[in-house]
Image: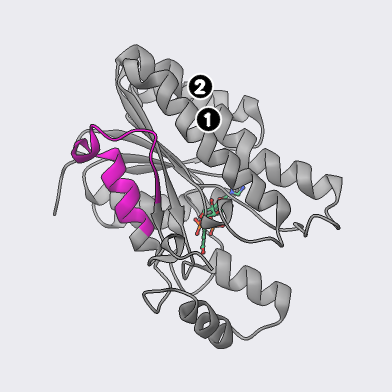
Amino acid sequence: MDTRLEGKIAIVVGAGQTPGDKIGNGRAISLQLAREGAEVICVDRLPDRAEETAALIREEGLRAIAYVADVSRAADCEKLVQHVYEQRARIDILINNVGIGRGDAPPHAIEEVAWDKIMDVNLKAMTFTIRHALAVMREQRGGAIVNISSLAALAGHHMVTYEVSKAAVNRLTTVVALANAKYGVRCNAVMPGLIDTPMAIEGIAERTGQSREALRADRDARVPMGRMGSAWDIANAATFLCSDAARYITGVVLPVDGGMAARVG
Ligand code: NAD
């Protein structure tokens, strides 16, 4: 096993997952960071979800604790960082994985309540976990932040808030990278394409009434490589960006999408 993250303290925000028959991005990232040596603070709004991921890690003989926070509240972001710093005296890695789309609509139909909720969870939350983690990372002169964006930042048209929030996540990533490069803090984003996770499959199946098989076949067919990715593809990219192998990489938005971003039209 690669132990390139040995001794690192990692916070994964959105470490639980939507129930389903496949692993989600946040859970896969948490497991992968732990397998490569990090101690993982598994953060979720829902206590059972955070605990389930932490327990899976501990079952492998690795280190993890669960922590409950609603990161759409800036005060929760501050408390989270304070708690980890008090317990471990450092924060090496911050993964911002939460992202929702429920209630979203095309531009002509979007409602204020849905817009505010999605923006708070997808964009404000990330801004404030980063804002507070930066105090620690700048002081220790090092740290790696990875934001989970979406290819929807570049393409789509029917989920105006989700798409705009993810475009903003890409820009947030470069702003944070540039403002903190001289402190040794790196900030990058992973931009997943069509990934076979419960968040996507269960969410869309519920909304559209499509069968899971038909939905999976349809999504596979849209990818140049002929199949959706898995959460492990996202986890591998995020883990690489956190590691010293990526020590000269900052401000990058990395598509992990089987070639979708390379295709225009
Ligand atoms: P998931 O929904 O299964 O897990 C995310 C977790 O975040 C959940 O357990 C949820 O309870 C938690 N969460 C939600 N709001 C929260 C809040 N306010 N505070 C704390 N925790 C909160 O999703 P996942 O599979 O881990 O992937 C999520 C990320 O991947 C999102 O950013 C999403 O936009 C991105 N993404 C996914 C796909 C795909 O096809 N699956 C494609 C592109 C991007």
As for residue 245 lying within the magenta part, the answer is: yes
Q: Name, please, the residue furthest toward the top.
A: 139
Left or right side of 196 for 46: right
Residue highlighted by disc 1: 129
Rendering coords of residue 173 (x, y %): 47, 34
What's the distance in space between the residues labelled 2 and 1, CA to CA? 6 Å
Rendering coords of residue 51 (x, y %): 47, 50
Left or right side of 133 for 243: left
Query: Which quadrant would residue 159 be assigned to in this image?
Result: bottom right
Residue highlighted by disc 2: 132
Q: At numbered mark 1, what does the secondary structure look like: helix, strand or loop?
A: helix
Q: Is residue 23 visible?
A: yes
Rendering coords of residue 52 (x, y %): 45, 56
**Label 1 CA crowd tier, 10 Å (few <14, some 14–19, many 20+):** many
Residue at horizontal 57%, vertical 51%? 153
- Magenta residues span 234-254
Query: Which corner quadrant holds the C terminus?
Result: bottom right
In this rendering, the answer to whether 219 lies above or below 89 is below
Rendering coords of residue 103 (x, y %): 77, 58
Residue at horizontal 40%, vertical 62%? 231
Asked if disc 2 and disc 1 are in contact, CB closer than 8 Å, the reply is yes
Disc 2 marks a residue whose amino acid type is: His
Q: At numbered mark 2, what does the secondary structure look like: helix, strand or loop?
A: helix
Query: Which quadrant would residue 248 be assigned to in this image?
Result: top left
In this rendering, the answer to whether 27 lies above or below 214 is above
Residue at horizontal 83%, vertical 53%? 110
Query: Which quadrant would residue 93 be assigned to in this image?
Result: top left
